Image (cartoon, helix red, strand yellow):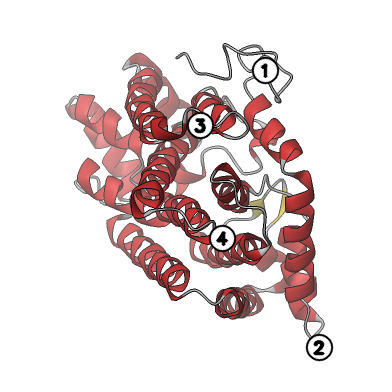
Amino acid sequence: MQNAAQNNTDNDTGKNTEKNPSAPLEQLAALLEDEMKAVNALILQHMQSGIPVIPELAGHLIAAGGKRVRPLLAVAAADMLGYRGEKHHKLAASVEFIHTATLLHDDVVDDSDRRRGKASAHTVFGNEAAVLVGDFLFSRAFQLMVEIGSLDILRVLADASATISEGEVLQLTTKNNIAAGEENYMKVIRAKTAELFAAACEAGGMAAGGTAEQCAALRCYGENLGIAFQMIDDLLDYRDADAALGKNTGDDFREGKMTLPLLLALAEADAEEKAFWQRTCGDLKQQDGDFETACAIMARHGIFEKGLEKAAAYGRAAQQAIAPFAEETRIYPLLHALIDFVLARRH
């Protein structure tokens, strides 16, 4: 897939993104380094509390790294519209707190033992503390939103928080149900993942004083990027284990989550394969070697390639959404190329 950044090695990015698929994200972070330092300072400041376990637990996850993709998108959207103030710093910190809170809650619900390559917070501090600190971070996010002083931005992020919670509940109700279908899967990932990507981009445009059309285009970009991102993430869960993934490969299979690769495999399944999927992901009666069998079935049906095609369609929609900004040469090429980075992920 061609993009502006791949065709231009002499602009601000200074690298060929075709040779280095991770370059767009790295370059975006480097280009906005000073802005993101201000965002990180706000994150560290507002996760403090007189109750020691709160910053300790929050720091366990926040300090573990992560690419800060969502807050970076908020800052990038504002920058692309020419904004040079500071309001978007609090916006980006709010977005990261919302994201971190959902991760804390997610890991408790899923009983995940790893996050970002280290022990998940609930395995170290306990479920109760992880849930409550997640609630604390949600509260901090809304305190920062109030300080921004924009009801429109508050509305976008408040709506996003509610939608994310709805997505979590919907995923819970479809778990272990092999008849759930791809329509429900799309509802889940639009709510759980794509909504915060969309809100970060839209609110970044709002912070910069963008027009309704500009903010809508940024939202469309973020939503489609988020969908593609989650589809690739779900496909990778059925690939070979890789420490760089920061989680246990095969977790979705072991939990019986109805994700894209499983749903595509079910659509291709014969009676024997359907019985296998019902036993392993519906009834959760798993045996040694079942995950390897699941991966072999998916390889036989070309599931990764079919899933990648679906993700690529959303990637193209994201790139089309920001076409009106093509004359902006600082941020636009990297946001355009970021889609190819997401689609090229192999870990």
Q: Are marks 4 and 2 in contact (CB under 8 Å)?
A: no
Closer to the eye: label 4 or 3 = 4
Secondary structure beneath label 4: helix
Is residue 130 depicted above or below 64 in this figure?
below
Mark 1 vs mark 2, CA separation in Å: 44 Å
Residue visible at 65% across and 49% down?
A: 68
Residue visible at 73% across and 75% down?
A: 46
Is residue 78 depicted above or below 271 in this figure?
below
At label 1, the amino acid type is Asn
Residue placed most toward the observer, 211 or 228 = 211
Q: Residues within 10 Å of mark 4 (few under 14, many from 20)?
A: many
Mark 4 vs mark 1, CA separation in Å: 27 Å
In this rendering, would 53 be left or right of 305?
A: right
Judging by the rendered image, the residue that carries numbered circle 4 is: 99
- Does residue 269 appear anywhere in the picture? no
Judging by the rendered image, the residue that carries numbered circle 2 is: 50
Closer to the eye: label 3 or 2 = 2
Res. 97 image quadrant: bottom right
| Place of residue 78 in the rendered image (x, y in percent of width and height, measured from the top left) | 57, 51
Which label is found at residue 20? 1
| Place of residue 291 in the rendered image (x, y in percent of width and height, measured from the top left) | 47, 33
Res. 173 image quadrant: bottom left
